[in-house]
Structures are given as C-alpha cells and as structure tokens.
Amino acid sequence: MTDFTTSIIIPVLNEAKNIEDTLVLIKDQVASSDLEIIVVDGGSTDNTVSIAQELDVMVIASPLQGRANQMNVGAAVATGNILLFLHADTKLPHNYDQLIQNTLSKPNVIAGAFELAIDSQRKSLRLVEALVKMRSHLLALPYGDQALFMKRSTFNNVGGFPDLVIMEDFALVKQLKRHGKIAIAPAAVTTSSRRWDKLGVWRTTLINQLMIIGYYLGISPNKLRELYLKGKK
C-alpha cells in the first residue's frame, strides 16, 4: 500500500481521565506527517475538549449525540486514506501503523481490528480476552473496542456507521463482511477494565451477549439501549 496515511478518529464524552494518555501515546509512536488525529466530542461537560486541544489535535463537536454520529462526523472531515476508530480509553500497540498496513495489504481483506487486552490483573478477564479472541478469529466479528480500521473508500462505500443508538460497531462489521474479509492484526490494543470493574465481569459479559441476541431477534436499537442502561444500574 503506497502513500499510507492514517486518520485516527476518537469519539469522546467526558473522557478527561483517559484522553491525555491515549493521545500522548499515539503521537509518540508515529511521525506526525503520517498521522491525523480527530477527536469528536459528543457534548462533554468536563475538560475533555480543553485537554485534547492542548495536545494539538483536531477537535470537533458532533451536531448529534451518539458514538455512531460522532465517528461518522470524524470520518467526513478525515483526509487519511486509512480510517482507524479508537475508543478514548483504549491504547494502540507500539507498531500499529505497520500492522494496519500489513493487514489491509492481504488479499480480499477490506477491514481489520486488533486483538483485545484488558488492563487488569483479574484472572476472570483473561477468559474474557480468550472469548474475544475466539469470536474475532472464528466468526470475524471484532467489536469497536478492538479499534476497527479500513480504507476510507471502503468506509464510504458501505455508508459508514449505521445511525443506531447502540450496536453500531456490530452492524458495521456485519455490513463489511458482505463485501470482503475482516482480518485481525497480530497484536492487541489495551482497553480499560472500567466497565467490568463497575458491574462485575459476568454481569457485563451477560449484558453484552443479551444485546447481541436482542439485535439478532430484531429488537429495536432504542429498546436495546433502554435495556442496556437499565442493566448497568
């Protein structure tokens, strides 16, 4: 792949505790000439925006709330020929740029993601990581916390993230699979354990699986989000 440039799109909402570490790590790893970082704010009420602005990255406000809308807004202004969608609490592996290039250069591969590592010593989360690995490789179904990436042309061809209040990453991956292969890069992103810490490993896992079942059963995304929020209380 020639003229390889990457736009990293990070949707944020009250991520002041995470955004600085994530951005500093990204900027330390790749020459600025090969990289564009776009932080898309969804209405933060903390100092997320000011922290990102101080780190000299593009910061824009999404006119509509919701992660899908934020990522689509970021993609619309991106100039790189590769789009990488990154959660604010997730850190990329050291050589992510080369891994992306190698992955997308494989025959019939139109998109990719990374393995998942969870920043915790809890043994139960090693099982979660193993299950994610099995799902990603056997079913080619990575989720958004695994840092999805693809050519900008591919993203545009499939219409971007569906306008859903939940499961937008799952729906995009399903759409991409109709057009080509999704590959998993041989390295892991490291994501915060905060959601598992808050609700517990098994409750969090159960809620996630119920959302997938509900999606396949045709339950509306608005209803699924309502059930998801109730489950987190």
Image: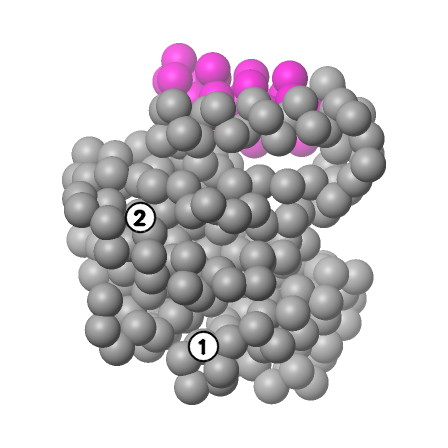
| Residue 57: x %, y % from top left | 56, 81
| Residue 158 visible at all | no
> What is the crowding at mark 1: few (fewer than 14 residues within 10 Å), some, or many (at least 20)?
some
Dominant secondary-structure state across the stretch colored magenta: helix
Q: Which of 81 and 220 is in front in this view?
A: 81
Q: Nearer the viewer, residue 71 or 112?
A: 112
Q: Which of marks 1 and 2 is nearer the N terminus?
A: 1
Q: Residue at x 34, y 74 (%)?
A: 5
Q: Which of 58 and 86 is in front in this view?
A: 86
Q: In the image, 5: left or right of 203? A: left
Q: Secondary structure beneath disc 1? A: strand
| Residue 170: x %, y % from top left | 42, 34
Q: In the image, 172: left or right of 25? A: left
Q: Residue 111 carries which label?
A: 2
| Residue 68: x %, y % from top left | 45, 50
Mark 1 touches mark 2? (CB < 8 Å): no
Above or below: residue 79 compared with residue 13: below
Identity of the amino acid at label 2?
Ala
Q: Which residue is drawn at 79% across and 40% down?
A: 120
Q: Quadrant of the N terminus?
A: bottom left
Q: Quadrant of the C terminus?
A: top right
| Residue 227: x %, y % from top left | 61, 23
Q: Residue under label 1, please give it.
A: 36
Above or below: residue 214 compared with residue 34: above
Q: Which of 10 and 33 is in front in this view?
A: 33
| Residue 22 visible at all | yes
Identity of the amino acid at label 1?
Glu
Residues in magenta, as a range = 204-233
